[in-house]
Each structure stands twice: as C-alpha cells, then as structure tokens.
Amino acid sequence: MRSKVSLISSLTTGCALFDPFISVEQNLSLIADLLKINFDKILRFAELLEIDDYFEYKFGALSTGLAARVVLALNLAKSSEIYLFDEPAEALSPEGRELFKRILSELKREGKTIVYATHHPVELADIFNKVLVLVSGRIVFRGTIEEFLSEAFRGRNACIEVEFRKKIGAEDLEKISLPEVEYTRDFLRLYVNIFEAHIYLSKLLSRIKVDYIKSIKVVPRSLEEAYLIYVKRR
C-alpha cells in the first residue's frame, strides 16, 4: 500500500535532497536512480511545470520558486494512486501555482485520489469535491465545497460592490435601506444570492442617483472569505 501513496510536503524541505553545485538534470538523474523513479515521468512533469529549459542550470542558482517546481516534478513522478499534499504550493510563484493547479486537475481526471492540506482555501477552487475544516485541531466542518459555501454565506454567495464618484450624505445612504448591506460615504457592499443579483441591482439603482456612481460590479464571494467567516462563528 505504501508504494501507492505519495506524501508531498512543503517543497522547500525537499530541496535538501539536491546538490546545489551540479545541474538540475544531474540532480534529477541521480535521485531518480536512487529512488527508482522513471526519469521519463520526471521529464513529463518538468515540461508541464515549464522547468525543462532550466535543466542545465546549477540547482543552487535557481530561484526559490523554480527550485520548488523541480522538487514538485520529482515527487509527482512517483507512480501513486493516492497523493497526500501538505502545503505544496507554499514556495511557488503565482505562475507556478497556476501550472500546479493544471497538474492537479489532470491527476483528478486520471482518477487519482488527492488529499490536500492548506491554510489558503483559494487553492482548492475548481479542483476538489469535498472539504474538511480544522480549527485548533478540531473538525468544525465536513462536506462538499458547495455545502461549505452555502453554510458560510447562508445563501448570500455574491457581493454587489458600488464605488461612488464623491462622498454621499447620510440622508442618501439611509434611502438604500436593504438587508446585508455595508457602506461608507465612498463605497457600498451588498451581499446577495447570485441568482437574485439583478433584482437588488434594480433596487439599488432606484435608490441611488446614477450620477453618484463611479463603478458597480457583481463578484462571487471566495472560499477564503467563507473560511474566515466560518472560523469566526466557531
């Protein structure tokens, strides 16, 4: 069973396996022989992570983000059915995180089981089916991501954001009089169900002078926000 499971923890700790004074390719070849990993699989993930152009560089000359991608390519190349990730994106650049998300999606399509521990819920979006939330070592939520968002936001899963051209008076603000609204004299946020956003937009526009509005947009609320709300309630 152990050979079918890969534990991939913080990628910065994985750098200890690499010799900083020889090339990336030499490092990967030596470690592949030592750990009996198929080198062609390492090459495949290196290409997906866009680090194959750095194979001639000395490992010690790489940036932290590139070094993390090299370690990730090595770990992903292990033939496994179950991947246990512990803060794997910690050292990755924004570009590296996007490339990594594509690989996770591919592993999911291949039917692999992925367990992913993170302090940044945004990393879970569009990939994972279920979420388990721990607070101080205690499980406070277990279910689908849809259930998590629904419970955290209590149905109000979108935000209408209005920026005013100029500061508006208290009298105009009082006219808005809608539930789940936050505002100052410079901006307004109204939390609504995404499917009812058009209704509330109409209500807002009927209660605020159009000349006052600099911009208005509807944005979905994030996993990160849901997590913070949920933790505060506990």
Image: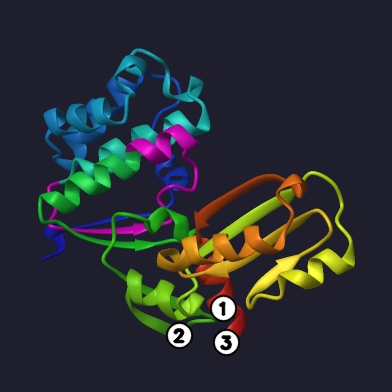
- Bounds of the magenta segment: 79-99
**Which residue, given by chain and number where applicable, does mark 1 sit on?**
231
Residue 26 location in percent, x, y?
A: 28, 21
Residue 47 location in percent, x, y?
A: 24, 25
Which one is earlier in the sequence, the residue at label 1 or at label 2?
A: 2
Would residue 187 appear left or right of 63 to someone viewing this image? Answer: right
Q: Nearer the viewer, residue 99 or 41?
A: 99
Q: In the rendered structure, are the residues bearing label 2 and label 3 in contact, judged by CB atoms less than 8 Å apart?
A: yes
Q: Which mark is residue 234?
A: 3
Query: In the image, what residue occupies the spot 46% across and 39% down?
Result: 92
Rounded to the nearest angstrom, the CA distance separating label 2 from label 3 is: 8 Å
The N terminus sits in image quarter? bottom left
Query: In the image, what residue occupies the spot 18% across and 53% down?
Result: 108
**Which residue, given by chain and number where applicable, does mark 2 sit on?**
140
Residue 103 against residue 44 in the figure, above or below: below
Label 1: how many residues lie within 10 Å, few (<14), some (14-19) or many (20+)?
some
Residue 33 location in percent, x, y?
A: 17, 33
Would residue 80 appear left or right of 125 to someone viewing this image? Answer: left
Q: What residue type is labelled 3?
A: Arg
Q: In the rendered structure, are the residues bearing label 3 and label 1 in contact, judged by CB atoms less than 8 Å apart?
A: yes
Q: What residue type is labelled 2?
A: Val
Q: Which amino acid does label 1 sit on?
A: Val
The C terminus sits in image quarter? bottom right
Q: What element carries label 1?
A: helix
